[in-house]
Image: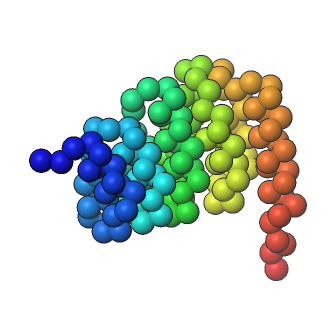
Amino acid sequence: MRTPTDYLALAHAEEDSDALQNLARCPYPFVWQALASNPHTPPAALRELTTARDSVWNDNRLLRLLAEHPGAGLRVLRAVLDAVATKLAEGERPYAAVLALADRLELEADELRKLGTFQGASARLRHLLDLRLSARIRQTPPTA
């Protein structure tokens, strides 16, 4: 019988996609966060984690980790974007996830800028979001 510590260790060290996918269904938020930090976690598991809920703090941290994950493709990032938008509309403040999403060039600046219009978005978040999006424009190489 596995303990929560066993699940956490697996989530940090496992490389097998099927095993990681199964761990995404684990009931422990610290395991979800470890999965979101594991570079081997497959996109399907990451996408599943975008709907995992525990507490405001744990949920917001998980969304930030998912937004930062190197294997999070466009589908995962859009799912994180939707989850963040929902939280902002409810008055929550997943600001670190918003700013992590702003650093992802896979997402359009216009869809990210909309996050600043929700109830939970502060003036400071809108300012930082604008700064991040402006920096992206300067970093993006011109297309031929």
Residue 30 in sight here: yes
The residue positioned 27% from the left and 42% from the top of the image is: 4
Picture layout, residue 136 above or below residue 128: below
- Which quarter of the picture shows residue 135? bottom right
Picture layout, residue 94 above or below residue 137: above
Marks counted in the figure total 0
The residue positioned 39% from the left and 57% from the top of the image is: 12
Measuring from the top left, give residue 134's x and y in whole percent. 85, 50
The residue positioned 12% from the left and 47% from the top of the image is: 1
The residue positioned 55% from the left and 63% from the top of the image is: 70
Colour scheme of this structure image? Answer: rainbow
Residue 86 in sight here: no
In the figure, is residue 35 to the left or right of 16? right
Which residue appears farthest toward the left when viewing the image? Answer: 1
Measuring from the top left, give residue 18's x and y in whole percent. 26, 64
Picture layout, residue 105 above or below residue 116: below
